Image (cartoon, grey):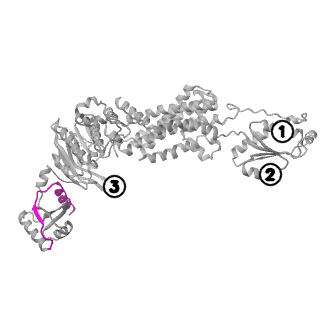
Amino acid sequence: MSQGLAVEARGLQRRFGDTMALDDVSFDVAPGELFGVIGPDGAGKTTLFRILVTLLLPDAGSARVLERDVVRDLWELRRRIGYMPGRFSLYPDLSVAENLGFYAALFDTTVAAARETIAPIWRQLEPFAGRRAGALSGGMKQKLALCCALVHRPEILLLDEPTTGVDAVSRREFWDLLGRLRAKGLPIVVSTPYMDEADLCDRVTLMQRGKLLVTDRPAEIGRRYPRPLLAVRGGSILGLLGILRRFPHAAAVWPFGAALHYTDARAGAAPEGVAAELRAYVASAGLGEVSVEPIAAGIEDAFMWHMAEEAA
Amino acid sequence: MRPILGFVRKETLHLLRDRQTLAILILLPLVQVLIFGFAVRTDVREIPIVVVDPTPDVATLELRERVAASERFRLVAVAPSTRELDSQFQEGSVRQALVLPRDVERRLGRGDTLAVQLLTDGSDPNTGGIMQGYATAVLRRWHADATPAARGLRIEVATRMRFNPTLESAHLFVPGLVAFVLTIVSALMTAISITREKETGTMEMLLVSPIRPAAIVAGKVTPYIALGFVSVLLVLVAARAVFEVPLQGSLLLLLAESGLYIVTSLALGIVISTRAPTQRTAMLAALAGLLMPTLMLSGFIFPLESLPSPLQALSHIVPARWFLVVVRGIMLKGAGLPTLWQETLILAGMTVLLLIAGSRRLTIRLD
């Protein structure tokens, strides 16, 4: 494995008509790193991936993958990159083995030569080797696609939303496989709309409307949450939401499952003090007893915060 | 080489797995030969005819027998008057009527002019003309035999149709059918199969691989070239078995020219597929842009000479037009390359242009 950066994006821009799909995107992926691009649909993740795998040209900026330019060195890169597009891109009328064999041939290699690389995935696929790809479950399809992306033993893996539309168990199994590949030193860039998958990455970047909001280790992104954050439970969530949003110091209140996440506007305020104030405020509004406790911010909190800030 | 072979294998699997399409592609040539052979005949047989004979005598009996004996006609009735004719023509039970004057034998004996009326259903001008021709021929021969001795000077015109002496329409349509079937198999199927990759997103995986666009195309079209040859042979065998269409010239030359036309069609399919975003668009483009001209502007169904001049001019850019000349030449006239080199050259030129146009549009990226 080379010592240089696996991915080096500098000021990438790409426009489709009036839409700015990528707006000044810069980030690095270290060798052997599992890097997550987290963002909702339409954030520009697919455009970013397509530029990195040489399928699209940036309007401005530059990107290097494996220390090669994605525009100039496309033929060399295409041999060395493993890519899994967001849409299911296998041939439904070909069997599992035939699909794999075809992608091996496409890269001028054989399945046998890749045996070791794909072993952990192939073990799960082998019972279905003769089955048509179209008849596989969503999770198995994604594993087959991953297997096909690996069959030419790439030096970097770029996976565009590999777990979208896949059941929870298959998602966990898929991430398990990614962990094993990473353990062998393979750099992986993966995009996902699921915030909970961010914690499985070494580092993530939060993406929204073509811009990267923040790039860091998942734990660090929560820790860097700039305001006191409290979880409020009890009573009717909707009634509570209305009242909390009217609290003079409220910066943001969002429902998170059964709780409300309340962010105070005063950056330096002590969380315990804010909690007491809130309890009193809610009681004065006639909503009775609620539980208020300071919490550590997660990725989703950070995402909401940065999004709101970006919009302001 | 391995990538291209892998591609050929994959395309062949697609073709074999899609049983319905495969069945259609193989049955198509056979069904077309039968349809065109039996249904779309331009030669006419068994014309329902009525002879109106007010005063039957030996001479008119002789004429009636001649009409009845010909396989061109089916003598429906002999009527004394023309009263029924209008309604019979309208309901279509009769398509021709021969109205004789009174006292035919006596007039013939005197050498009088014989005013015979020949009525023909002209709702289809082509067959109408042909029916008229047949009936006139019968009348002429009968008249010549019935008139005792030639008085004065008479000219006998002996006509013979070369290359297709009995005017079998099968001989004319089979070459056109070869072009038609090849256009479907090669152009339409290639266009659909390439756009399918775009539509389902597999094209993205192909593009991101190190395989060059030209190799993708080569791998994709190879199975269709094979299928094209199978179709040609099927048409030829069926035409020969069912309609005894001859092959006067060399089979090898015919196959070589067909090979050229297959590549022309494939190139057309590629050009369509580079522009059409979906299978549906590709299909419509191939149907409207290729199949219609192949049927209408090639001389397959309508003689080129009968087209209005703008369409005649347009027909020059229809590859099937040139291919048709070649196939008809080889099959019916036994012509060889020395007579057909011009058409072959035009076809080859078109193919090269189309291949260039197609390959220029092949992209190495998504946009």
The chain to which mark 1 is attached is: B
Q: Of B91 and A202, which appears nearest the observer?
A: B91
Foreground: disc 2 or disc 3: 2
- The quarter of the rendered structure image containing the N terminus of chain B is top left
Q: Position of residue B165 (x, y in %)?
A: 70, 32
Q: Which residue is mark 3?
A: A17
Q: What residue do we see at 60% from left, 26% from top?
A: B249
Q: Of B54 and A289, which appears nearest the observer?
A: A289
Q: Is residue B353 visible?
A: no
Q: Position of residue A290 (x, y in %)?
A: 12, 66
Q: Which residue is mark 1?
A: B63
The amino acid type of the residue labelled 2 equals: Glu
Left/right placement of residue B186 relative to residue B84 reads left
B122 shown above or below B224: below
Q: Which residue is mark 2?
A: B84
Left/right placement of residue A50 relative to residue A235 reads right
Q: Is residue A279 visible?
A: yes
